[in-house]
Image: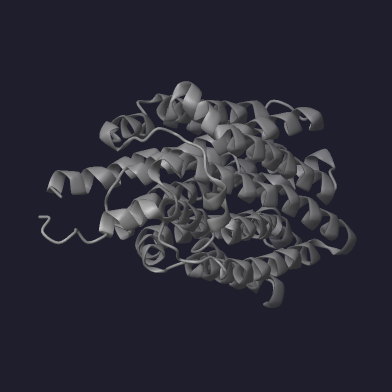
Amino acid sequence: MSRFQRWREPLTALGLAAGPVVALGFTRFAYALLLPAMRGDLHWTYAQAGGLNTANAAGYVIGAGTAVFWARRFGDRAAFLGTLVVSALTLLLTGLTASYPALGALRFVGGVTTAVCFVLGSALAARIAHGAGQRRAALLVAIYMAGVGIGVVLSGILVPAVFAGAGDAGWRAGWLVLGVLGVVAVLAVGPALLAVRRVDAAAEAPTAGLSRAALARLAPTFAWYILFGAGYVSYMTFVIALLREQGLGTSGTATFFVVLGLASVLATLTVWGRLIGRLPGGRAPALVSLLVLLGVLPVLLLPAGLPAALVSAVVFGSSFMAGPTAATVLARRALPPAGWTAGIALLTVAFSVGQAIGPLLSGALSDSGGVAVGLWLSVALLAAAALVVLRQRADRPAHLAETTRPAPTGVR
């Protein structure tokens, strides 16, 4: 590999990461920062608050399920960029209404576009190093996933700054600021546009469906992703509400969110990209689930305060985005290149089903017993996820086995 290619591939993955910055870091996870203010200003119950996240997750299910259609209809690149633009626009529109049905509709639309953008961006990232070793491919996927952490860091800096001057009523301005930043990221000769143009056209493969055998091979991973999605998103939805309930102010919750995002970026780039490429079968997602579970416990078991919150932010933040990284790498390993987009899309459907169920159940438990009770659901779901995925076998599919089969005698 030339020196130019060695640097071009990571830069391409980093450019694609503009997708998860806006679509996940802003559209999805910044909701945790804005939720307590929206709930207080609009007088919602926890179930209503969780219901908006469920609307987002329901849209995510549909978006993930139709991602292959959009890729075939418009092409991976155009669909990736188009849904990224719509994701940024929904951020702006969310700040312009206080109507619960309208907010639910916007969260739903944002879920659809977020999923399509994320699935197609993941598939593009998986294709950057087509034909390269599994470890390098995993590293490039991890660089793409690091965009989520970057979005979380920016949200943690910008949103509390808005609240400092406006209080709970500042949630509108918070969405608008994120929307403006999202539009700028897309329109100002964005790195995503440069990145998708640089994906080697020779590496592209036609998008195809999956056989029953391929789906059966990944059955434990599908089950894991449902449980993992439900467990981690319940924490991400309500942890800020818990910290505020425990007495942490705006500066404390902002510090928590920034540390969580920084931990995600650093660990995704320096640890998970290499580690996931080395661990066979379901060991990587099982390890991820266990670490995410451990990240939830400090805010439930340690004395309330900033130290417990920061321990939770570091442990949880350093591991939660390794889940999508592991899922993408497993799909790349188990499926032929033509099935990568479909495989990642179906896995994302499973992920989003869990994310639709988790906040609703956690919100209902929080209404009856407090936010901490709702977060214990995360612990149980993540424990189940770690156990289920250990059944994922490390089979080597035919398309990979053929590339490493020794040549017949006499063939050079």
Answer with left or right where residue 146 lies relative to residue 249.
left
Image quadrant assignment for residue 24: top right
Answer with left or right where residue 152 lies relative to residue 365.
left
- Residue visible at 63% across and 36% down in the picture: 111
Say which of 167 and 378 sits in front: 378
Say which of 160 and 147 sits in front: 147
Give the vertical position of 297 relative to 202 (above or below): below
**Residue 182 at x, y percent in the picture:** 50, 32
Q: Residue furthest top?
A: 74
**Residue 389 at x, y percent in the picture:** 58, 66
**Residue 53 at x, y percent in the picture:** 71, 44
Q: Residue furthest right?
A: 368
| Quadrant, the C terminus | bottom left
Task: Specify whether residue 344 is in view.
Answer: yes
**Residue 155 at x, y percent in the picture:** 54, 45
Answer with left or right where residue 21 lies relative to residue 337.
right
Image quadrant assignment for residue 310: bottom right
Task: Specify whether residue 139 is in view.
Answer: no
